[in-house]
Amino acid sequence: MGITTAMCTTFKQELLGGIHDLDTDSIKLALIKASPGRNYGAATTNLSELQASTSDEASGTNYSAGGQVLDSPSITVSGTTAMCDFADEVFSNVTVSADGCLIYNAGQSNKAIAVIDFGGTVSATAGDLTIEFPSVGASTTVIRIA
């Protein structure tokens, strides 16, 4: 199966309905294991999909189920594009492998926001695994509305 980088379709609908507040809700990032058993992308709706009976959430030493809270949310506008950026996320002293991640809103019943494909397996062995967010820009920021 696989992972496709996409903003989740339900997130777009929920955003227009006022469900998400990206700079005050608890936004988290969970790792998707290497070679997941199902597809993840625009149709992903909730963290529970990763944690179903055949869990596709990564697991390993010092990695906590559900991932970690994203820090320093920053909402900006460039031209006609609104963007939300976060500080790079560091999973410290972990032994884990992942092919992608799910950004989700833990403050709103774990609703999915975006799925990111790492383009291959990334891993750490008793070390830090850092998820680097791209520089802020109308065509580079992960969460953006044009």
Image: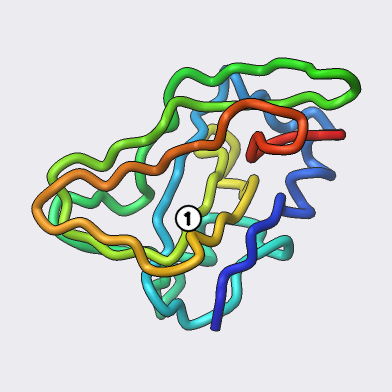
| Residue 86 percent across, percent down from the top left | 51, 27
Compare residues 32 and 80 and report the one nearer the observer. Answer: 80
Label 1 residue SS = strand
| Residue 46 percent across, percent down from the top left | 59, 56
In which quadrant is the C terminus drawn? top right
- For the point 64% across and 45% down, which residue is it? 113
- For the point 66% across and 64% down, which residue is it? 41
In which quadrant is the N terminus drawn? bottom right
Compare residues 38 and 116 and report the one nearer the observer. Answer: 116
What's the coloring here? rainbow
Amino acid under disc 1: Cys
Q: Residues within 10 Å of mark 1 (few under 14, many from 20)?
A: many
Which of the 4 quarters of the picture holds residue 131?
Answer: top left
Tell whether 59 sits left or right of 81.
Answer: left
| Residue 61 percent across, percent down from the top left | 13, 57
Compared to 109, does 126 lie above or below?
Answer: below
The residue that mark 1 highlights is 101
Q: Looking at the image, how many numbered discs can be counted on the residues? A: 1
Tell whether 96 sits left or right of 9.
Answer: left
Compared to 23, does 61 lie above or below?
Answer: below
| Residue 117 percent across, percent down from the top left | 54, 61
- For the point 55% across and 36% down, which residue is it? 134
Which residue is situated farthest in the left direction here?
Answer: 126
- For the point 55% across and 44% down, which residue is it? 104
Compare residues 137 and 35 and report the one nearer the observer. Answer: 137
Which residue is situated farthest in the right direction here?
Answer: 80
Which of the 4 quarters of the picture holds residue 98?
Answer: bottom left
Which of the 4 quarters of the picture holds residue 57?
Answer: bottom left
Tell whether 26 sits left or right of 9.
Answer: left
Compared to 57, does 69 lie above or below?
Answer: above
